[in-house]
Amino acid sequence: MAVLWLDEISAGDLEKVGGKGASLGELTGAGLPVPPGFVVTAGTYRSFIEEAEIDDELFEVVDVDVDDSSALSDAADRAQELILETPFPDELREEILESYSEVGDGEAFVAVRSSATAEDLPDASFAGQQDTYLNVTEEALLDRVRECWASLFTQRAIYYRQEQGFDHSVVNIAVVVQQMVDAEKSGVMFTSHPSTGDPTMIIEAAWGLGEAVVSGAVSPDNYIISREDRDIDVTVAEKKVMHEKDEETGQTVEREVPEAKRTERVLSDDEIEQLVDLGERVEDHYDNPQDVEWAIVGDEVFMLQSRPITTISESNGEPTATDSAIDVSEGVTDGSGTAAASTTDTSSVSTGSVLVDGLGSSPGTVSGAARIVKKLDDLAKVDEGDVIVTEMTMPDMVPAMKRAVGIITDEGGMTSHAAIVSRELGVPAIVGTTNATTVLEDGQVVTLDGDKGAVLEGKTVEDDEETEPVEEVRPQSPVKPMTATEVKVNVSIPEAAERAAATGADGVGLLRTEHMILSLNQTPEKFIEEHSVDAYIKELIQGIRTVADEFYPRPVRVRTLDAPTDEFRQLEGGEDEPEEHNPMLGYRGIRRSLDRPDVFAHELEAFRRLYEMGYDNVEIMLPLVNDAEDIYRAKELMKDAGIDPDKRKWGAMIETPAAALSVEGMAEAGIDFASFGTNDLTQYTLAVDRNNENVADRFDELHPAILRLIGTVIETCREHDVDTSICGQAGSKPEMVQFLVDEGVSSISANIDAVRDVQHEVKRTEQKLLLDSVR
Ligand code: PEP
Ligand code: MG
């Protein structure tokens, strides 16, 4: 049997039908209303390659040095070609088509989804799980099945398996073929409260197909139902868009919701009753709370997927400290609602006198022995659990920063290296103390309060109070707050990619490449001289790919190099850097790239190769541009490098008043997005050096002049259909979030530890806007 029907499958068939297939089969078997369908089993894929005798060649061609990009690309092309060009044996073709004809009336639109069986792959997306084809008809069915099989051999999948040491020949793939449901309404449901496990069901609902809700394209209605007395608390949202099937092309399209239906309540009390009954049955079947995707057509309710809710605290419903901060009305959001992660309750820091103070730049409170680091050799004495005390951190301190429990610097502001990197690593930090390296003594035990910016004498935090940086930022509920404005995350060091992805952000709004370069400890020119152009390009690819993989298919906006000459000067080869009176106003960002198109070409080549490898989630962002002229010149260089600007998403940072005032010309030059770099925009608008602690109190990103520049840019960009975003630190501040959402910004990119709060703030502001519009 090449196929198994969903009603023949149970959870134990994972090996044959993959995770997705097994789950749908289990639900069907339990009598739950799952759209009919079948699974082309993993064994069928295996016999297909074996009977056609392509298996040996297949596994041989993918056994390549994955760091050799062109070898990897050739391997993926050849492996996919082998699968796509091998015809189906007649018997198999007939069996699949015959099964198809039994779904619906033989003319059904079906969804074709790959369902990988390599259970032990930590992230199934690498096994081709991403491949989903909607609204497929008989004509295209066999091709789509073969494409799902071929998705085991994309460059990303091959690379990943090789890196993780998985044998290519043991990974199998099944394909689910299931009738499409032309949902009139759809959404998600938690059968119990996602954080506390209380008997409260939460349903989110919107018009049309479910992807609009799951992807966050629409703010859905929210229904909170007490399972004890079935009392319903309703919040109706303004649903501007819906996803539905285009009758002519059969493709899924996004359409505007007709005015009259936008603020109409999606679910009737009767429908809620049906969903709640269904939810109780699913929860009983699995014996634990579930997160369910559902759809309604006419008066029929369907279940599309069910997963256990893994975030309910183990204290058996007893609210934990985190839970107690949750407003039930936001239970369908990430469920935390708390301020940025703190390693312990700051109220425990009551003893000890303040030794030094500065800017609290990465939250949390920790205790440890101070290690004064004056030169690189001193880093060796930093042990696990120590607090690094230094003038200013540098890229090659990152490994030691990871060992440390806290970081204190003399210099720097909220946007300095120490502040950015410590936040990304989740290590509490205080910057700009002016005198920590002279006041504190080596070995002295101190407590660092990264929220208040104070260093106290003695130990007030026990070691076992510390928590896991990745777990701290992981949302407490599997569904993020549904916001129309996207909430992304900033990443500066590839080491932080996992932590950044764990936030559930919609993508990366800024990936700074200069930290990757600075950690090579050589200027690009020196590195190329000592190694090779290819080695330099590979370093870039490697760093970007770490982040792009972690987020795939969510977009990752990668910024081309932007390091001031004083930072380059500290590297090997830095003696050749020009001496500048004020590096912040000097040779950096796009100015340097346009001046050295030969060096810039290597960065662009890295992007070209990444696109070739299939990283279609990578976007290019140009830093420190001033006007359309900069954009046109950079665009030409992109074309010269073999990147088609019409096919790729690219844009510019708005970091100077000139850029803000020239954005119309940039829009005409073809940018897809403009992103506010408020760290620089503030420095250049207010003439306040962002790294100078003497004027740190004047560094005000919410200054009316800056808000005015931002407001005008958003307005102009909206007229020209250009997306707007923020990726400076100010994107993590509630006041800035409110302002931007009010003005209609498309996305906000926040620091890792601020993503949860920003999601909530965006949701709150969007709901307020909505209420204001109907009052
Ligand atoms: C900014 O200027 O706001 C920005 C995000 O870029 P950087 O901090 O790297 O200069
Ligand atoms: Mg900047």
Image (tube, rainbow, N blue to C red):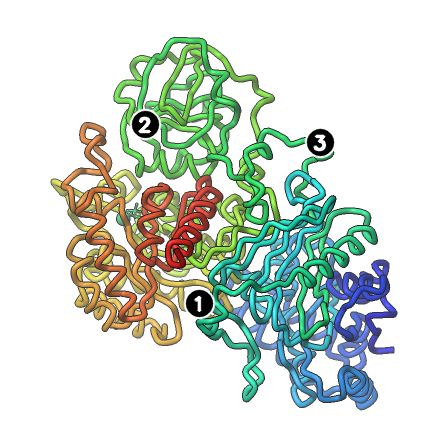
Q: Give the Cα separation between the discs numbered 3 and 1.
A: 49 Å
Crowd around label 1: few <14 · some 14–19 · many ≥20 (10 Å): some
Task: Estimate the x, y position of residue 26 in percent, counting from the top left.
Answer: 82, 61
Q: Quick one: label 2 or label 3, which is nearer the N terminus?
A: 3
Q: Earlier in the sequence, mark 2 or mark 1?
A: 2
**In the image, farthest residue toward the left:** 581
Quarter residue 302 falls in? bottom right
Give the answer, above or below, for where 508 lies relative to 381.
below
Distance from disc 2 to disc 1, alpha carbons, whole Å, reads: 41 Å
**Percent position (x, y) of residue 638?**
31, 70
Residue at 83%, 74% in the rendered image = 5
Q: Is there a contact, CB below 8 Å, between mark 2 and mark 3?
A: no
Of residue 670 and residue 755, the one placed in the foreground of this image is 755
Q: CA distance from mark 2 to mark 3?
A: 36 Å
- The answer to which of marks 3 and 1 sits earlier in the sequence is 3
Which percent across, then down, holds residue 402? 48, 33
Q: Are marks 2 and 1 in contact (CB under 8 Å)?
A: no
| In the displayed structure image, the side of residue 572 where residue 556 appears, left or right | right
Q: Quadrant of residue 550?
A: bottom right
Residue 359, disc: 2
Q: Quadrant of the N terminus?
A: bottom right
Mark 3 crowd level (few <14, some 14–19, many ≥20, 10 Å Cα) = few
Name the amino acid, label 1. Arg
Front-most of residues 342 and 396: 342
The amino acid marked with disc number 2 is Leu
Left or right placement of residue 703 versus residue 232 in this view: left
Three-letter code, disc 3: Ser
Q: Is residue 400 in view?
A: no
From the top left corner, tell me how far across and down residue 377 is, in percent. Answer: 39, 26
Q: Which dot, 2 or 1, sits closer to the camera?
A: 2
Q: Which residue is mark 3?
A: 315
Q: Residue at x 34, y 12 (%)?
A: 355
